[in-house]
Amino acid sequence: MKTLVRTRHPSAGIRWTLYAGVLLAAVLAMTGAPAAHAAGEPTICTISPASGSAAGGTAVKIEGNNFASATSVTFGGVPATSWTLHGSGWDTCGSDGTYIVAVAPAGTPGSSVLVRVTNVSGPSTSQVYFTYNATAAVPVVTDVSPDSGPTAGGTTVSISGAGFTGTTAVMFGGIASSSWTVVSDSLITAVSPANVPGTVNVRVTTGAGTSAANVASEFTYSATLPGVTGLSPAFGPPAGGNAVIITGFNLTSATVVRFDGIAASFVVSSSTSLTAIAPAHAAGSVAVQVQTPSGISSISSASTYIYTSDAVVVTTVDPDTGPIAGGNDVTIYGYGFTGATAVKFGALSAISYTILNDTTIVAYAPAQSAGSVYVRVTAGGFTSAATTASTYTYTGIGPVISSIVPFSGPVTGGTSVTIYGAGFTGAYAVAFGSYAATSFTVIDSGTIIAVAPAQPAGAVYIRVTTLLGTSALNAASLFTYTGSGPVVTSVSPASGTVTGGTVVTITGTGFTGATSVSFGGTAASSYTVISANSITAIAPAHSAGAVYIVVTTGAGGSPQVAASQFTFTGTAGTVSYTLTFRWTLLTWVGIDGISVDAAVKGLESPDVAATNDVSGRVTAIFLWDSVNQKWQAWFPNASNIPGANDFSTFRQGRAYFIAINGSGSTTWVVIAG
C-alpha cells in the first residue's frame, strides 16, 4: 500500500497555470537551465514528427546532444535518405544548441524503428522510435483559390487535390494555417496565416506524408497589390445593373473596377470590401479585377463572375473524370445550390451529396458506362443547364505501364526506374511487388520516375495507382532484383522475452561477412556467422511487440519481410529516473499515454510495487510545444481542475523538464513502456 503525500492546495495549480510564463522565467532565472551534456556519445531526447509515410521522405527534426561530430543517422539501421546538421538556437532539449533534420528512408507500414545518431564516439543509445504509418496515399495539391492574399493573413483559401483525409497540418510556406477544415478527401478550406511578402507553397500533411511543392500549390503574399477573394453574388443577368460586393485586400485606393475589361461604377467601403455595379455583358464567365496605383489584382476562381439568366449554375466539376465503378467524391462549384433537392450525373442520381454552401456541393458519383455526362443540380424548382463546364467523363481506362528502364537492380534497392505508359496523371502510389517505392515523381501522364525499395532477389511487378485504378500485371512491368545482398528467409524461434537472451537461428542467403545483426534497430547482444546461409544471434532486451531482424553485410541490409519478423513478449519491467534538485531533463520511455498524475504518484496500471510516489517532491513539469512554439505546464494536485494543466499524459519519446523541491536528488521508478 503506497501513501500519497499532498503538499499543495488545488487552487495553487490554477494560480501556477495563470502565471506559467512568469513562473518559467523566474524559475530558470533562479536555478538556471539544465546543463549541456558532456562531450561524448550522442543522445536523442525527442524527434518531430514521430511518425511518417512508409514510402519514406518525411523530414524529421532530431534534438539532443553531441551532434556536432555526427557521422550518420539511421532509422531501424537503415541510413537516412539525407540529413543536415543545424547549430543555431536553444532547442527543445535545452542542449548544446545543435539539432539534425533527417529525411526518413522507406520502412515497413505499421512498424516502429529505433532512431540513432552516430558520432566519432559511437552511436546513440537513446530509446527513441519513429513509426511508419500504414500505407496510404500521400496528399497532392492541384489548386489553391484564391492564390494570393495580404501579408496580414486571414484569407480563406480553397485547397483542391487528393488524399486529404486525416490531414494533420496545412502549411503556408513554413507557417501553419491559423485554422482549416477538411471538407472532403479532395477539398480543404484554410485560413492563411500572416507572412512576409512573397510566394510560398501550400502543403498538406497527413499520416502518409506531405504534399509536394508545385506551381499549382503556390500562394502569394502581397503587401501592396490589391486582391479579390470573393464576389457576392457571383452571378447576375446579362443586362447588368445589380450590385456586387467585392471582398479582398488592399482595396482602399481602388481607381478602377473591371468586369472582363469593362469599367464599372463602385464605392469603396474599406480596405477589404467595395461594392460595384455590374455592367451589361453577354452571357458567360468573366474575370473581375481591381486596379490601384500599385497594380492590378490577379485572376482566380474567387474573382469569377457569371452572366446568366439561370437561377442554378454549375461552373466547375472537380475532378471532371472518374471510374465507371463510381463511388468517388466530386466537388461541384457554382451557385444557387441552397436547398438543392437533386444532383445527377447524366440520368442517374448521385449516390449521396452534401451541400456545403450556396456555391459548393460534394457528391459521390454513381456507377455507369464509359462516356461523358452532364452534372446537373436542382434547387428551388430550377435545374442547372448542361454546359461544357458541367461535363464529367466516366472512363474504364486506368494507368497502363508499357515499359520500364532499367528492368533490374540490386536487392538493396535505390535504383532509379523510369516507368513509361499512359494514364499516370494523379498517381498517388507506385509499388514494386508488395513494397511501396521509396519515392516517385510523376513527370507527365506517360512518365514516372520511381526509386526501387529493398527486397529479396527475384522478379516483381511494378504497379501504378491513380483514382481510376491500378495498372495491370504484364511482362512490360516486370522488375528483377539481383545481387548477393543478404536476405532473411526464416528465424527460429520467432519470439522471445522482452528481457532478451533468446538464442535465434537466422536462415537465409548472403550472410558471409555480416557486419551487424539487429532486432528492430537494436543490435543483437552477440551473433555468430555459421555459414553463408545461417547465423545464430542472441536477442537483446527490447520492448514488447513485433520487429524485423536485419542482417547487414558490405552489400547492404537484408529487406524487412514477414519471414524476418521476431516478436518480443512479456512485460518490460521498470525504468528508473534520477531527479535532481532544480531541473532534470528526461525522455519518457514509460507507458505511452499514462496519466501524469498517476505516474508521479506511482499508481500506474497495472500497479507495480517497485514504482514509487514522487508527488511530494515534484513541483512542476514542462513540455515544449514545437508546433505552437510555447511551453506547456503540468502542476501536481491540479489534474482535475479545468484549465490548470496544459497536458495530462506522458507520450513516449517526448522530452520533459521536471522540477523538484528540497536538496539533493530522488529516484523515480516507473513501468517501462
Image (spheres, grey):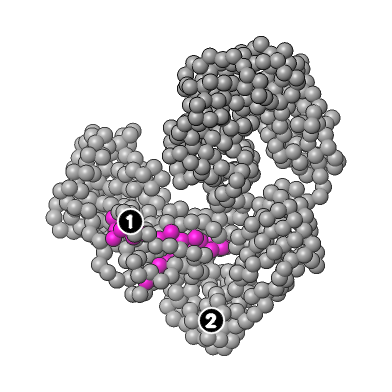
The verdict on residue 8 being magenta is no
Q: Is residue 590 visible?
A: no
In the foreground, 468 or 635: 468
In the foreground, 258 or 156: 258
Q: Amino acid at mark 2?
A: Gly
Return the x and y of residue 175 as percentages of the image width and height: 45, 43
Q: Residue at x 52, y 38 (%)?
A: 220
Q: Residue at x 49, y 64 (%)?
A: 82
Q: Residue at x 62, y 67 (%)?
A: 453
Comes first in the chain, label 1 or label 2 = 1
Left/right placement of residue 12 relative to residue 563 reads left
37 up-or-down from 488: above or below: above
The residue carrying mark 2 is 554
In the foreground, 381 or 560: 381
Q: Which residues are magenta?
A: 93-119
Q: Which mark is residue 88?
A: 1
In which quarter of the view is residue 343 placed?
top right
Return the x and y of residue 577 as percentages of the image width and height: 28, 60
